[in-house]
Image: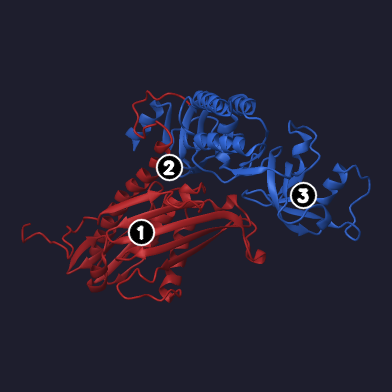
């Protein structure tokens, strides 16, 4: 056991399964925007997920193989309306907890001044069950429910991606793959957007939306599948770049 | 084979496990899945969740609920088994659930539930421990946080000898049967049942043999899970420290 630990301490990255002890480092669980993949047990810190541990200057980061999406304040998410509440809608964002969108949010977005009145306001007129909506997580309440907002104050999301979303192709991926699809400082997604014409929306909860030609959608899907299948492989951006280049060239040749 | 050595009905030595293999991620539609083959046992496990619990009044405010269904297929036994959940299946579902509850970090998912569906496609004794072993791999594959893996193995007394990994005939004809499930790293026992009679010394011997068997299966669990990541990368699980950074 100790020899394994010693071996691990000398490595830059290695694979762990749940329950495997990891050598102690400062700033545990600081990786992945506060999401923690370690738990303290009587034998020390152990990994809770299957994944790859990466040694960084800050300590240990665990890149999980799969993870259940935990809503975080400020995340842009895409969800499906699943039920009506007395004063809003229940939205399924594929997370560990349910999400709620208050009707007052929609009134504010539509520029209304009045307060929500359940007697006169018809919730079914605005969103139906099964509607796709984009929203930003405004708060996590005491019951750990995500409270959604349609009027985010500080966000980089385009206003047209907030509210009801129509006419998009939907690609669902695991939330752990989203950082890889976005890339370091957005390098990967920037490259994809530059090479594929269309509207690409990425929800932090693992929903990718695309509006554009069907052929471009298929290309995007192929690229995303490549990223997913090679999540832990080094030099992925280069591979995708060459793939985008060659595929686009082929496509141009076909059309010409 | 010398005549002095105790050879079991299927030709195994007393402390020899049946042939085993575990595969993770075999089902496309489930959130997590695994398959175990232990001798002629063939068990498939699918995991869904965490998802909102229904009915809502049953949901717990501080943690998630595990729903576990252990089911034997009608063709899993030599005589057709009624697909209706039997008394034994309901009991085993409960026993497996309580064993896995120890390992899953349920507090992370209040008001949610996690579904575990265990299908025994072919049964040949010790299916409860094999189910636990496979269910634990399926949970890890689903990305559900675990304190430790859970792995099970059985031991028993056959013709006065203590043997590990009891098969179907040995289970029926043997004097005692001791299935256990453990969390190997935390060194905790999460399941311990006994059918039949064992002396104090025999119990100790049986427990130790089951423990050794469980630890052997734990290595196979790790191999199955690590194989998933190795498939999508060039990172060796036992590296020499010269790996490239992502």
Front-lying residue, A210 or B184: A210
**Is residue B198 something that shows in the picture?**
no
Chain B, colour shown = red
Image x and y of residue B240, in percent: 33, 26
Image x and y of residue B151, in percent: 37, 54
Name the quarter where the N terminus of chain A is drawn: top left
Residue contact at pointers 3 and 1, CB within 8 angstroms: no
Q: Which residue is mark 1?
A: B130
Taking the image as shown, residue B164 lies to the left or right of residue A1, namely left
Q: Residue A21: name its quadrant.
A: top left
Q: Disc 2 vs disc 3: which is toward the camera?
A: 3
Q: Which residue is mark 2?
A: A17
Give the residue furthest to the right: A114
Indicate the secondary structure of the residue bearing disc 2: loop
Q: Which residue is mark 3?
A: A101
Mark 2 closeness class: few <14, some 14–19, many ≥20 residues within 10 Å = many
User: Disc 2 and disc 3: Cα gap in Å?
Assistant: 37 Å
Chain of the residue on which disc 1 is drawn: B
The tag earlier along the polypeptide, 2 or 3, is 2
Chain A, colour shown = blue
Residue name at image x 58 percent, y 57 percent: B64
**Is residue A212 something that shows in the picture?**
yes
């Amino acid at each position: 056991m100790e020899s394994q630990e010693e071996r691990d301490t000398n490595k830059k990255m290695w694979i762990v399964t749940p329950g495997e002890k990891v050598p102690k480092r400062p700033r545990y669980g600081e990786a992945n925007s506060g999401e923690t993949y370690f738990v303290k047990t009587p034998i020390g810190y152990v990994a809770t997920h299957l994944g790859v541990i990466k040694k960084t200057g800050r300590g240990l980061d665990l890149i999980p193989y799969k993870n259940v999406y935990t809503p975080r304040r400020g995340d842009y998410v895409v969800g499906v309306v699943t039920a009506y509440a007395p004063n809003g809608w229940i939205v399924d964002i594929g997370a560990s907890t349910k999400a709620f969108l208050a009707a007052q949010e929609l009134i504010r977005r539509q520029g209304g001044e009045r307060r929500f009145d359940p007697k006169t306001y018809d919730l079914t007129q605005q969103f139906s069950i099964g509607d796709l909506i984009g929203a930003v997580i405004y708060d996590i309440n005491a019951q750990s429910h995500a409270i959604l907002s349609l009027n985010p104050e500080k966000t980089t999301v385009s206003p047209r991606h907030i509210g009801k979303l129509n006419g998009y192709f939907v690609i669902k991926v695991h939330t752990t793959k989203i950082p890889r699809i976005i890339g370091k400082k957005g390098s990967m997604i920037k490259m994809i957007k530059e090479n594929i014409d269309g509207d690409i929306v990425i929800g932090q909860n693992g929903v990718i939306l695309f509006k554009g030609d069907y052929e471009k959608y298929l290309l995007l899907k192929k690229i995303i599948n490549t990223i997913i299948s090679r999540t832990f492989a080094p030099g992925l951006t280069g591979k995708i770049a060459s793939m985008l280049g060659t595929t686009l060239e082929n496509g141009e040749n076909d059309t010409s | 084979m010398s005549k002095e050595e105790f050879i079991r009905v299927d030709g195994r030595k007393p402390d020899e496990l049946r042939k085993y293999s575990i595969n993770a991620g075999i089902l496309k539609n489930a959130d997590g899945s695994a398959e175990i083959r232990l001798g002629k046992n063939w068990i498939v496990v699918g995991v869904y969740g965490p998802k909102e619990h229904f009915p809502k009044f049953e949901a717990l405010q501080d943690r998630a609920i595990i729903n576990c269904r252990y089911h034997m297929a009608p063709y899993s036994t030599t005589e057709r088994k009624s697909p209706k959940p039997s008394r034994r299946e309901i009991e085993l579902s409960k026993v497996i659930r309580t064993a896995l509850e120890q390992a899953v970090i349920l507090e992370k998912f209040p008001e949610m539930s996690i579904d575990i569906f265990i299908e025994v496609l072919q049964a040949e004794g010790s299916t409860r421990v094999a189910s636990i072993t496979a269910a634990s791999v399926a949970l890890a594959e689903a990305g559900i946080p675990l304190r430790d893996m859970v792995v099970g193995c059985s031991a028993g007394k056959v013709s006065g000898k203590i043997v590990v990994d009891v098969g179907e005939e040995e289970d029926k004809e043997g004097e005692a049967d001791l299935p256990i499930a453990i969390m190997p790293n935390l060194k905790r026992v999460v399941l311990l049942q006994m059918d039949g009679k064992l002396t104090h010394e025999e119990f100790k011997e049986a427990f130790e043999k089951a423990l050794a068997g469980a630890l052997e299966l734990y290595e196979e669990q790790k191999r199955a899970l690590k194989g998933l990541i190795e498939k999508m990368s060039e990172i060796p699980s036992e590296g020499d420290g010269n790996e490239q950074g992502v």
